[in-house]
Image: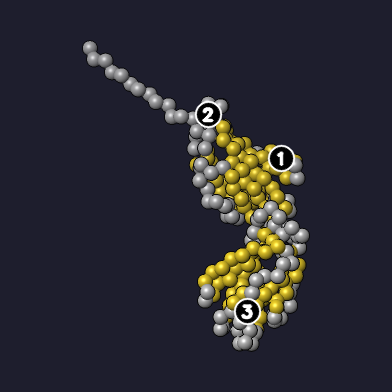
């Protein structure tokens, strides 16, 4: 008689996600099953987000919690979960427990509705005049300078006292980037003949960049 051996291998239990998506799509970094902490920044008009999370193991258990202002709120798990966001910070905690009921992984999404303090309260150029006049909600400006002005400085002030401003220039000398404290006077920015673009991102005390920069086009 013949003897047959049948080897049955059970895959190791997995507590990893195979997909994770948030809409509007602002997940940073992009999803990787071996990365467990993410950031998502939304405009202040976004009052809820769509969360879609799927486990590698079909038999795994997925639970979702929302943590806001130190309050933990359970979110019933489904393939499409709509999660309300309050202004400021919300942490979304996704716990995956494998089919062995032992193996566990936790994914965190630190979500932020673009806080009102991620704006400038004042922006003063030296020399020149902003057009249109400065308004925190207005993000695009221009400045006309005579040809003899070869540099320009700015004094940007953030709404939050602990905020900073990331200033980026991109013209003939290449891309340069430097961070300044609120109300600090920038270094002289060299100007080429013609158009010179200066971009300013407001950075919160938590180190988060506002989703939209202030852009100043300096015409020399």
Residue at the (59%, 45%) spot, across then down: 37
Q: Is residue 112 above or below residue 129?
A: above
Instruction: Judge whether residue 58 can be spotted in this image.
Output: no
Spatial CA distance of label 1 from label 3 is 53 Å
Residue 169 sits in quarter: bottom right
* Front one among 143 and 55: 143
In the rendered image, residue 76, in percent from the top left (x then y), is placed at: 65, 39
Q: Residues within 10 Å of mark 1 (few under 14, many from 20)?
A: few
**Above-or-below relation of 133 to 115:** below
Residue at 69% over, 73% down: 154
User: Residue drawn at (51%, 42%), measured in percent from left and top?
Assistant: 33
> In this rendering, which labeled residue sits more in front, label 1 or label 3?
3
Residue named by callout 1: 73
Give the number of the mark in front: 3 or 2: 3
Mark 1 falls on what kind of element? strand
Spot occupied by residue 92 in the image (x, y as percentages of width and height): 65, 44
Could you say where residue 89 lies in the image, as x and y percent from the top left? 70, 50
The residue labelled by disc 2 is 99
Q: Residue at x 43, y 29 (%)?
A: 11
Q: Quadrant of residue 138?
A: bottom right
Describe residue 119's horizontal placement relative to residue 104 as left or right. Answer: right
In front of the other: 198 or 110:
198
């Amino acid at each position: 008689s013949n003897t047959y051996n049948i080897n049955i291998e059970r895959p190791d239990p997995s507590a990893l996600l195979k997909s994770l998506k948030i809409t509007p799509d602002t997940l940073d970094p992009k999803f990787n099953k071996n990365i467990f902490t993410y950031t998502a920044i939304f405009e202040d008009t976004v009052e809820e987000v769509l969360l879609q999370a799927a486990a590698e193991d079909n038999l795994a258990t997925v639970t979702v919690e929302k943590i806001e202002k130190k309050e933990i709120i359970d979110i019933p798990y489904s393939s499409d979960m709509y999660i309300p966001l309050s202004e400021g910070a919300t942490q979304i905690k996704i716990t995956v427990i494998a089919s062995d009921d032992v193996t566990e992984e936790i994914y965190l999404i630190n979500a932020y509705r673009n806080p009102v303090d991620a704006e400038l309260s004042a922006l003063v150029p030296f020399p020149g005049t902003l057009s249109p006049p400065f308004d925190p909600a207005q993000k695009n400006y221009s400045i006309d300078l005579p040809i003899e002005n070869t540099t320009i400085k700015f004094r940007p002030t953030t709404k939050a006292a602990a905020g900073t401003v990331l200033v980026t220039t991109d013209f003939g000398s290449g891309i340069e980037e430097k961070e300044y404290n609120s109300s600090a006077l920038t270094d002289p920015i060299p100007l080429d003949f013609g158009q010179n673009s200066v971009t300013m991102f407001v950075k919160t005390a938590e180190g988060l960049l506002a989703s939209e920069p202030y852009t100043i086009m300096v015409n020399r």
